[in-house]
Amino acid sequence: MKSIWEKLLRIKGPIIMILITIGVYLSFKYLLSLILPFLVAYFFAWIIRPVTETLYRRFRLPRILGGTLSLFLLFAVFGTSICLLVNILIKQAISFIRNLPIYLSMIADKLDHICLGCDELFGLEEGTLRGMVDDNLMQTVNRVKSNLMPQVTEHTISFTIGLVAFLGILLIIFVSAVLIVKELPSFQEKYSNHSLYKDFHRITGKLSEAGAAYLRSQLIIMIIVALICVLALTLLHNDYAVLLGLGIAIMDALPVIGSGIIFIPWAIIKLMNGNIYEAAILITVYLVCQIIREVLEPKLIGNRIGIKPLYTLISMYIGVKLFSLMGFVLGPIGLVIIITIYKVVNEKTEEIANAKTITYNED
């Protein structure tokens, strides 16, 4: 393994970066689908391992049993939280669908006013522009009916098969996580002194640190933003406070886009309708969300990742181009992996170069 690091000393930095990028791309394209369930299983094992080890040391409870109990508890808490949240979201979505005719009527009234104004402005006969809008809307609705409904019917069986396959994958993840918790101590004891294990552990350790810092910070910020948005929308007597609050928190986590894409147009509409109080609350909530992100993100992440928002946005665009919708997530993850591996390779090659220099000076 030492000879590989010595060969890397002769390769220039940009070439190393290109090789790492190609390796990450090929791994995502050809290996990720094969190992993804086991990566998820390792993530769950990493979460429950402290509890499992505590049960093993204090109560001599076998790791496989402690891991199973810990994982069941984790799934129960997580599943219950998700079910409660989904229940609230479904109720608000149903309420929105029931009130949809009222909202459509309000939109239609606004549309009538705008179309009449445009007819007068361009000297058209009254109702001309509205007729064009109605024709286009009807064509769109008919196109959706003719294209969407047959696809829904055709994919019902495929959806059922996919659901069964998903449950099977969940079972594989569960069993794998328990086995990883059980075998990890013996695996580390057996291979901890191997040079390949040390180099691999060095990379995965930095990736875990960066990934954990990023995920933890984003989760904390999203929860705080969601709570603030839900509270503010509740004060405005919005019937969909939870649904909108979660949606805004997700948008706020996206680089460049942020919560402003919802709050700013919404506040402008409120101002145009003369609702100065509601517009002020929306702008205030937007500013508070921005301040929270600007203050908390550097403190929670620090310099452990060091990726600018522009680079994250570029990685998302490239990821979508390479891996379609999944690239939206894979792009930033790939960028973190590439930068982390590059840093580790540089540190390792510098250590070898310094060791050679010291040996040469001693001779």
Image (cartoon, rainbow, N blue to C red):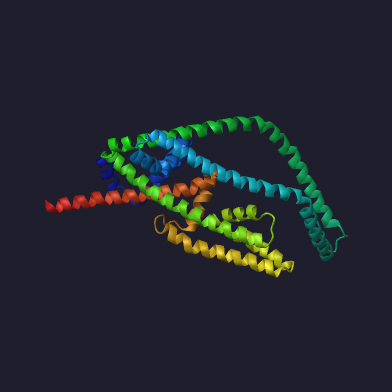
- The answer to which quarter of the image holds residue 121 is bottom right
Q: Residue at x 76, y 46 (%)?
A: 140
Question: Residue 193, image x and y in percent?
Answer: 25, 39
Can you say whether 115 is above or below 343 in the image?
A: below
In the image, residue 293 sits, relative to residue 320, either above or below, namely below
Name the one closer to the observer, 295 or 321: 295
Q: Residue at x 69, y 55 (%)?
A: 239
Query: Can you see residue 177?
Result: no
Left or right of residue 271: residue 229: left
Q: Position of residue 149 (x, y in %)?
A: 73, 37
Q: Nearer the viewer, residue 82 or 266?
A: 82
Residue 299 sits in quarter: bottom left
In this view, the residue in front, 89 or 252, is: 89
Q: How many marks?
A: 0
Furthest residue in direction left, as rendered: 363
Q: Is residue 5 visible?
A: yes
Lateral position of residue 124 relative to residue 183, left or right? right
Which residue is rendered at x = 26% and y = 44% of the image?
6
- Name the quadrant containing residue 164: top right
Give the left or right position of residue 349, taking residue 169 as reference.
left
Q: Residue furthest front?
A: 59
Q: Where residue 24 sits in the image (x, y, percent)?
A: 43, 43
* Residue 284 image offset from top left, x and y in percent: 60, 67
Is 232 situated left or right of 137 in this image?
Answer: left
Please name whichever residue, 99 or 326, is drawn nearer the observer in this view of the structure. 99
Rendered view: 311 above or below 82: below
